[in-house]
Image: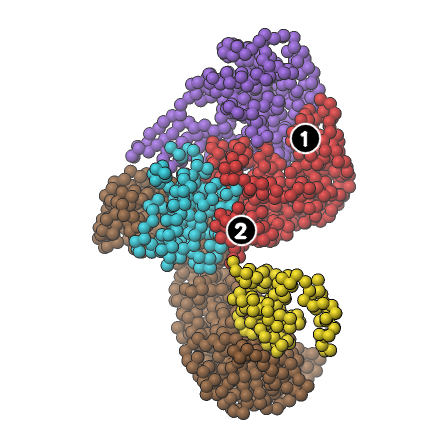
Chain colours: A cyan, B purple, C yellow, D red, E brown
Amino acid sequence: MSVNNEFKPKIVAFCCNWCSYAGADLAGSSRLAYPADVKIIRVPCSCRVNPMFILRAFEKGADGVIICGCHPGDCHYSTGNYYARRRMTLLFSMLDYIGVEKGRARVEWVSAAEGVKFADTMNSFVSKIKDLGENVRLGDIRCKN
Amino acid sequence: MLKIAKKDLASLFALIKESGELYLPVKVAEQTNFAAYEDGAEFDLDTLKSVKSPKDVFFPQSETLYTCKNEGKTIKITPEELVDQPFVVFGMKACDVGGIEVLDRVFLSDPVDSFYAARRAHGTIVALACHEPEESCFCKVFGIDAAEPVADVATWMIGDELYWKALTEKGEALTEKVSSLLTDADEQVVENEKTAIRAIIEKLPYSDLSLEGWNGDAVAEKFDSKLWNELYKPCLACGTCTFVCPTCQCYDIKDYNTGSSVQRYRCWDSCMYSDFTMMAHGNNRTSQMQRFRQRFMHKLVYFPANNDGTYSCVGCGRCVDKCPASLNIVKVIKAFGEKGE
Amino acid sequence: MTTEKKQAELIREISGVEPLKCMKCGKCSATCPAYNEMDIKPHQFVSYVANENIEALVNSKSLWKCLSCFACIERCPRNVQPGKLIDAARQIVLRQKGGDYLKDEEIPELLDEELPQQLLVSAYRRYKR
Amino acid sequence: MQELITRAKELLENGTVARVLGWKIGDLPYNPEPAFFETAESLDKFVYNGFCGANLSKYMIEASKLEGKTLVCLKPCDTYSFNQLLTEHRVDRDKAYIIGVGCKGKLDVEKIKKTGIKGIVSISGAEADSACDTLEIDTLYGKKSCAYGDAMLERCHVCKGKEHKIYDELIGESRDTADKERFAEVEMIEAMSPEEKFAFFQKELSKCIRCNACRNVCPACSCRKCVFDSNKFDSAQKANVDSFEEKMFHIIRAFHVAGRCTDCGECSRVCPQGIPLHLFNRKFIKDIDELYGDYTAGAEAGSLAPLTDFKMDDAEPSIVNERG
Amino acid sequence: MQRIGVFVCHCGSNIAATVDVKKVVEVIRSEPGVVHAEDYQYMCSEAGQERIAIAVKEHKLTGIVVCSCSPRMHETTFRKAAERAGLNPYMVEIANIREHCSWIHKDINEGTEKAVILARAAVAKVNLNTPLYPGESRVTKRALVIGGGIAGIQTALDIADAGYEVDIVEKTPSIGGIMSQLDKTFPTLDCSACILTPKMVDAAAHEKIKLYTYSEVEKVSGFVGDFTVDIRKKARYVDADKCTGCGLCQEKCPSKKTPSEFNRGLGNRSAIYTPFAQAIPNVPVIDTDACIKFKTGKCGLCQKVCAAGAIDYTQKDEIVTEKYGAIVVATGFDTIKLDNYDEYAYNQSKDVITSLELERVMNAAGPTHGHLERLSDGKAPKEIVFIQCVGSRCSDDRGKPYCSKICCMYTAKHAMLIRDKYPDVNVTVFYIDVRTPGKNFDEFYRRAVEQYGVNYVKGQVGKVIPQPNGKLLVQGSDLLDNKQILKEADMVVLATAIEPNKDVRKIATMLTASIDTNNFLTEAHAKLRPVESPTAGIFLSGVCQGPKDIPETVSQAGAAAIKVVGLLAKDKLMTNPCTAHADELLCNGCSTCANVCPYGAISYEDKQVNDHGIRETRRIAVVNNALCQGCGACTVACPSGAMDLQGFSNRQILAEVDAICR
């Protein structure tokens, strides 16, 4: 248990500029706390997130990766998140298939108005990653030291 | 001549491992390759040829050369340490040993490759004669005798026993270490085995392959041959032939960013790849034909030209077995032979 | 799960009908030739199932008044297909009773002169095991 | 086979085609190589037998740049790849004269060798027009035999069918070879615990030597320059220094061909280390079928690949956690 | 190597309270590429911006990282500041250490540590930033409106009034559209012609508006600001310049048996015709299918009677090519075909009509000269039944899944008008719901019920059965009384669903404008950009985007017009530089990227390339920067990584990932 308490996961959050990044801003201006382990990368749209980015994050030592975009139907670019949804579904399925723990990568749709949802999502994601522990199955040993 | 029962090999390997790493053919997921022996690993001395040649014991597919780390605004460079512990490679075939000799010519000549030299200095090679050579073998063509490998120790697997003969000082030292497990053996059994092996070798389909015309002087005529234009066509430009080959020695040097440091490493490269020897201006060889030609010209012409006539092919036949497009060095040699070029 | 809830699910399962698709336009009732004979009207069938009020439904006269003419199915603008619901409710009763609702010999006296032949055949096929 | 050669000669001689893309007889009983034939005489070395497993559709990318038409011999499964290349504008239909050749299941010499047969001198029963169920094999160590089915490539056991999806004419008989459930292996892995799955792939991928044979043979991997060879993603690592790189390579490769892979099985056929690479691609095929509706890449030229398409009510990525 | 300056903002105590700003400055200083770092109370203030300008000069900065509030707040501010200091504005990156850090973390160590990492990520990104320059494209100051109904007319008038030239292309011989067929309009009961005709005249007379009637758009190429459109002017066989519109030709034409499109087929017209009396232009066209001259070569009567000599049987279709900066789609709607609704007996009885046909019946210029009569026998009806939602709100394939929106109101209008003019006629309306959201709409409906005694029955009609006596037996539900109603009616009026004009699919394809499953054009954003298509430069007006009534159509027409004016007012379009671009040497030309591009911004060209000495012609993706909006969908779809997005390049994002995971 004590080990778990000390474990500070590295978490990368890709947020689309129009909804989720703004949702994160709202969480901030509403002073809704979530762990500092989460670091946000701004992308124009969830469809900009290449599976290579996600694998790269794991390679370099991330313990969890979350992709946030506009709710389906609300994409600033009309259809971007629909493509992202298929891509990520397949990618996550493959990660599961090769034995990576379920839940290390996640997609959530967070609108610009959902500051609360953003904070809740990050809280639950961080706690999930803490439960899963350190990412040992994906990751390059060279980056571990 | 000494011997040990096949069933006691596990004890032999355990004993060898007490004083350093032991590399030998290990079966993982149906495939046999040389690997460091660990307890419980399934060693496999029955498969004639490991998929990859054992050259990576001395010349790993990838090895770090040094590490750079930012310390404030300065960079600290830490060279990788050289191998300084003895180790043993068990089960190399005569051709594989021939491959190491080719690598020696490259890496031990001036300037000496310290990483390779360190491994060669600390490694003891126990070679194993080829009990049942296969149709893709053609080591005979390069003057290699599969029946009598020349290494630190030569061994023969005959029936349920492994026959053991030290040939060098290193070999003697190793034999000394494991002498408790070895018993004296009848030299004649081994002689019979050699004769049997050589008889099979005579019957191998490639044994009469002629290398006529392939030598260091043949640069211009071979290079300009029109045959290359036909031969290369099925080539997929993969690196299979290169990576299974016991003599291919080309490597690339690259940097890996670990986040906190940069590791400069080298890794095998393949002249079949389009980015092989890529330079700022582009590439010397712009077509697959040229890259394909390079591989065979190097093995059969350029290398002998620079190494007293030694070919950089040992006839192990791995490329014959593994090429996805069924191309190989034999087909190249034969094609030139047929056309009389 | 209550019995009625189970039955409601069973009816949905047998019929393949999603009662929530109903927009309550009443076109089924408007179109039904046996409307006046029914105590629970075709459009109410849908809401009875949606509300899991199955006891009343299976005990209704309507269950056996439906001619299975499929007019309601044909005309329903939302593809709710109330006729299938009625049919499924009948199946439930039949399964419970474990036998035939009618005996062969009872049928002729119940026959209406004006009933089309096709309906008779269809009725036999449906209610006779 | 003779019919094929005769027809090819005819088409060469009457100028319909400028060259023939087929297989040339090898120097061992089992190693015919893909080859271009430009003259009728050279066709004497043409061969079509059980060892002609190579999918020639990818060679049509280069052949499409040549003058004149190329007669290309495509097996039923190869035609899917050709269609897919056509969809992606990588081959030119007008430059191809497609002879759909019959297929009775293709052989894998590795499978024969795995039964302990070595020193092969000759093999009979692999000829295209033979109806044998057994291969008679002459070796340096005596006569051996092997059931045709046992020597067949994995892909032939889960064959999509012997219908050519695109062709100009058909020559030769086919034989139905499908006798295994296509997704059985994938399902077996799906049923494993995460630890078992990880151990399985770790073991298989530890053999990978990054020779790129799988990629270079793959008709869906038709990129002029692979992303793993360019510096676009800092992904040109080349080495197999750590197991992560193999995972990255094979996952991304499978992802890039997802919805485009025709399951032609060439990747597994050519892997020198015998890694069952088709398990990656087939997983995506299974997922796509289950989540987005049945889709067969290459069944029809011009169809929209599932990853360039969507439905408003597609499954959410969290479905991965919900499924078993 | 960049020379990066990092500027850390205190934001008063907003940041400084939970982030040790000084520490961030100290740590970030040792990052590769950073040559200067400082902190300040309010970076966004004049003084703060000035500090940036000074540092740029003093330290020869090539890149800037501002650690402050959200880029959504002040990115533009700092980009402008950088630009003033002589830097390319796209060399600025923001590390959001307020909303994403100081405001959500309470522990100062935690906050500081995270702020450093966010700053590092921004530095890593700036290291790879390159100066970006917005592209420019010129704007042709002329708009095209496709469709000359009220939507198109209003859009054109508003654009023209703003001083821009605008052309209307209308495929029928006259502008006016469906509105010209209406009798009265709800909820005010104005005469439709009375309010529409002046607008038609205005449009025709406007010096900035050019009408292409009896014309169709044939081909569209180009992009926002610079479209080239081919318009097919169909041969009228009447010289518009000579014709005086006297109407004599129509009067004398011997072929008078063609059903009038304008009257919805309820009356006939001549072979040479104007659709209606107030048609604009008032120039007839010859229907060659009906014209005896064209069919047999004999006749030529119209030519003989035309004093102006305007009839020209040799006229040919003409293709006009025009350039436009913007295109408005206003193609309108039609009612659906009722062939699949046998239960309403529409094809069996002349007395079952659609509401739009009733408009013509009620109209003084219509087939019955405004008398309400049965079309079968001309008798005055005593009992009229209206059926709502015919084909609307249907999830089967016979109808449409949507609500047609206008039917409830026009049915109330019809019921009211009938009851007003013929108080002895009983009117029954079968409805599912009465939907009256709109100003004075519900009041209007209530008037129909309360003042005019229209009988509203909640329930749908199951079938309409023509009776031997000529009456129509209507069988419907009364859901409130829970009874089935059988009613003998003299006339039945069907509130038929509306659907987008059939031509819209063809037009949308030409414009690469997207269309939904119901053939309505898709808007760029359902809420925020309702009058724009996702394809830049294409705007939507009227029912082509979704069902609307007249006031809504007119408002949307105005909105589309102002969007067009906003576009045309620019001399040049500055395009967002954060667009995708293809690496020519890596592109496979496989079309995968184009398949996912929502803007049709990607096309393919056969280009000569020199790939390290290999010269060949390759099919290569070309991104039109004027159309690309920078979403990045193509970058991920592209397997070879040939497609990359400026400002959010693969390597930039990876650098951020690396910096965060370090």
- The x, y position of residue E621, in whole percent, is 51, 51
- The x, y position of residue D303, in whole percent, is 60, 53
| E163 lies left or right of A94 | left
Residue plotted at (54% across, 88% down):
E426
Give the residue number, with chain letter if any, for mark 2: D307
Give the Cα distance between marks 2 and 1.
39 Å
Q: Is C56 rendered above or below residue B207?
A: below
Q: Is residue E556 visible?
A: yes
Q: Nearer the viewer, residue A140 or E477?
A: E477
Disc on the earlier residue, 2 or 1: 1
Tell me the quadrant of the picture where the N terminus of chain D can be found. Answer: top right
| A138 lies left or right of B244 | left
Quadrant for residue C37, please give it: bottom right
Residue plotted at (57% across, 87% down):
E383
Q: Is E641 rendered above or below residue E408?
A: above
Q: Nearer the viewer, residue E589 or E444?
A: E444
The amino acid marked with disc number 1 is Ile
Q: Residues within 10 Å of mark 1 (few under 14, many from 20)?
A: many
Q: Is D66 rendered above or below residue E189?
A: above
The amino acid marked with disc number 2 is Leu
| B32 lies left or right of A142 | right
2 vs 1, front mark: 1
Indicate which disc residue D112 carries. Answer: 1
